[in-house]
Image: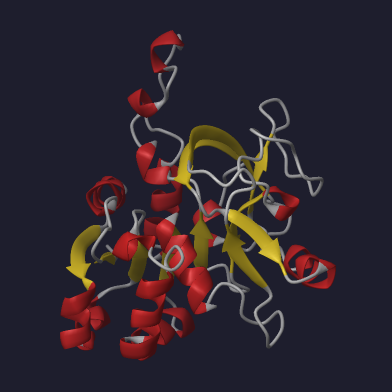
């Protein structure tokens, strides 16, 4: 089986890069945490990697808007590199702040319409929200590589600008029909995706259609607000001491394992 190399992009304010590297390495990948300035100096460094991951944190302090400065920096200086990852048979993963960056770049929403069809904005209550959430995969439709074989997950979120909104009902329908609304918030007892917006805290930010993560049309590019790297070990679960039997891995591990397995298929 081929061992993929994962480029974990760092920038001022990034703070989840080490945990994300650990998750990919536990799944069998080789990782390197690379500062964005190194890539700007030498973009060819990216040619040695099969996966590009933008981890969570607060890149450039989330000044102006979450992820906007890093997205502008990538677009201006590393646009060709980003396009190569998107266009070739490679994978791109954006977690929380990384998801926000990918949305600002437009790579997750391409193909729906020429003007921007969706964005991430402030949580409905206007505050930073830190809690665990129940999630369901729209598995009957989604082509998302990272969610293969996953039905549901329980993961933590930590964000202030995670509300997914579309330009209009037509754009939301286009995303849904293509299976690109890949990951949804659910009620604890639901276990499956629903378009009807759930109340807080099941839907922690007010996202349309309870969207927690979306993918591109190929399924190789994926962004999500929850943090899978924070539920890799079963002891990460907030109620792990109450369980009679512990699983081998936490529920976020499968996302990273799917990325590694993609290159062995």
Q: Quadrant of the C terminus?
A: bottom left
What residue appears at the point 71 percent right and 79 percent down from the top-left corner? Answer: 112
Q: In this view, does 112 lie above or below 237?
A: below
Q: Is residue 108 above or below residue 253?
A: below
Q: In which quarter of the image is the N terminus?
A: bottom left
Q: Would you say 140 lies left or right of 201 here?
A: right
Q: Residue 126, image x and y in percent?
A: 57, 47
What residue appears at the point 35 percent right and 81 percent down from the top-left corner? Answer: 74
Q: Residue 107, image x and y in percent?
A: 53, 77
Is any atom of residue 243 visible in this view? yes
Q: Quadrant of residue 110?
A: bottom right
Q: In this view, does 44 lie above or below 164?
A: below
Is any atom of residue 1 visible in this view? no
| 209 or 144, nearer to the observer | 209
**Colouring rule applied to residues:** secondary structure
Q: Residue 196, image x and y in percent?
A: 82, 45
Q: In which quarter of the image is residue 208?
A: bottom right
Q: In which quarter of the image is residue 32?
A: bottom left
């Amino acid at each position: 089986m081929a061992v993929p190399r994962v480029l974990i992009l760092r920038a001022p304010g990034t703070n989840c890069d080490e945990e994300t590297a650990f998750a990919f390495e536990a799944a069998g990948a080789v990782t390197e945490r690379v500062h964005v300035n190194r890539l700007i100096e030498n973009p060819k460094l990216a040619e040695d990697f099969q996966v590009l991951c933008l981890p969570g944190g607060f890149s450039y302090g989330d000044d102006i808007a979450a992820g906007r400065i890093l997205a502008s920096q990538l677009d201006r200086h590393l646009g060709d590199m980003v396009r190569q990852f998107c266009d070739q048979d490679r994978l791109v993963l954006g977690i929380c702040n990384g998801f926000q960056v990918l949305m600002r770049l437009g790579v997750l929403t391409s193909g729906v319409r020429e003007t921007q069809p969706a964005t991430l904005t402030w949580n409905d209550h206007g505050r930073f929200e830190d809690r665990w959430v129940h999630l369901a995969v729209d598995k009957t439709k989604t082509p998302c590589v990272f969610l293969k074989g996953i039905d549901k997950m329980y993961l933590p979120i930590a964000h202030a600008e995670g509300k997914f909104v579309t330009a209009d009902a037509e754009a939301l329908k286009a995303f849904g029909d293509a299976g690109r609304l890949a990951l949804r918030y659910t009620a604890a007892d639901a276990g499956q995706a629903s378009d009807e917006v759930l109340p807080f805290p099941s839907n922690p930010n007010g996202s349309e259609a309870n969207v927690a993560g979306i993918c591109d049309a190929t399924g190789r590019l994926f962004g999500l607000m929850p943090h899978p790297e924070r539920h890799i070990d079963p002891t990460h679960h907030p109620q792990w001491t109450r369980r009679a039997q512990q699983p081998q891995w936490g529920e976020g591990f499968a996302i990273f394992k799917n990325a590694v397995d993609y290159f062995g298929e």
